[in-house]
Image (spheres, rainbow, N blue to C red):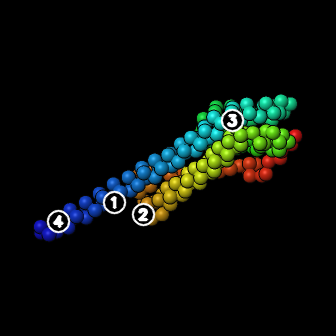
Amino acid sequence: MAFFIWVLLAILLLIAIIFVYYFNRFVILSNRIDNSLSQIDVQLKKRADLVPNLIETVKGYAKHEKKIINEVTEARKALLKAKDISSKVKAGDQLQTALKSIFALAENYPNLKANENFLHLQQELSAIEDKIAYARQYYNDAILIYNNSCTTFPGVFFAKIYSKQPKEYLKIAPSEKSVPKIEF
């Protein structure tokens, strides 16, 4: 009889451990998603913070190129005002497109292209673009792991118990996938 009680207690303990494990797993995966999302925000903010310096450097060389400079300024403002992830991504992509116009503009101004400040800012922005791409990839990877936990057995059982639903991947709109047209 005592053996039966010990086996029953061991089974109940194992079940409790499994419930705690899956609860903690969903919490950890959700936190990883939140962290990766905040890393995207950090990189978008760093990019937005570099833009005023870049604009000032370009203004001295390209005084009559106000349209491009205004586009960059407006895209930066939109990024700083964005509240949710989809609007931040959209504004970030608009800023990236506007920045490409600035770099294309530099081709017309050899002195600007050789300017040390401009080159340094261009290198920093390029590094930030790489970090943004990595942060987006990391976010989607975290979503993949979370969604797999929510949809595979036995995780699907625990996801229902803890009211966890699969989450959306960070998506790029089809219009943003096309190569931007840069006109002067």
Q: CA distance from mark 3 to mark 1?
A: 50 Å
Q: Nearer the viewer, residue 7 or 45?
A: 45
Q: CA distance from mark 2 to mark 4?
A: 26 Å
First in sequence: mark 3 vs mark 4: 4
First in sequence: mark 3 vs mark 1: 1
Residue for point 70% across, 38% down: 117
**Label 2 near label 1: C-beta < 8 Å?**
yes
Q: CA distance from mark 1 to mark 2?
A: 10 Å
Residue type marked 4: Trp
Q: Nearer the viewer, mark 3 or mark 4?
A: 3
**Label 1 near label 3: C-beta < 8 Å?**
no
The residue tagged 1 is 18
The residue tagged 3 is 51
**Where does the image place residue 127, in percent across and percent down from the top left?**
63, 48
First in sequence: mark 2 vs mark 4: 4
Residue for point 78% across, 42% down: 113
The tag on residue 6 is: 4
The residue tagged 2 is 154
Crowdedness of circle 4 by 10 Å Cα count: few (<14), some, many (20+)? few
Residue type marked 1: Ile
Asked if residue 102 can be seen in this view, the reply is no
First in sequence: mark 4 vs mark 1: 4
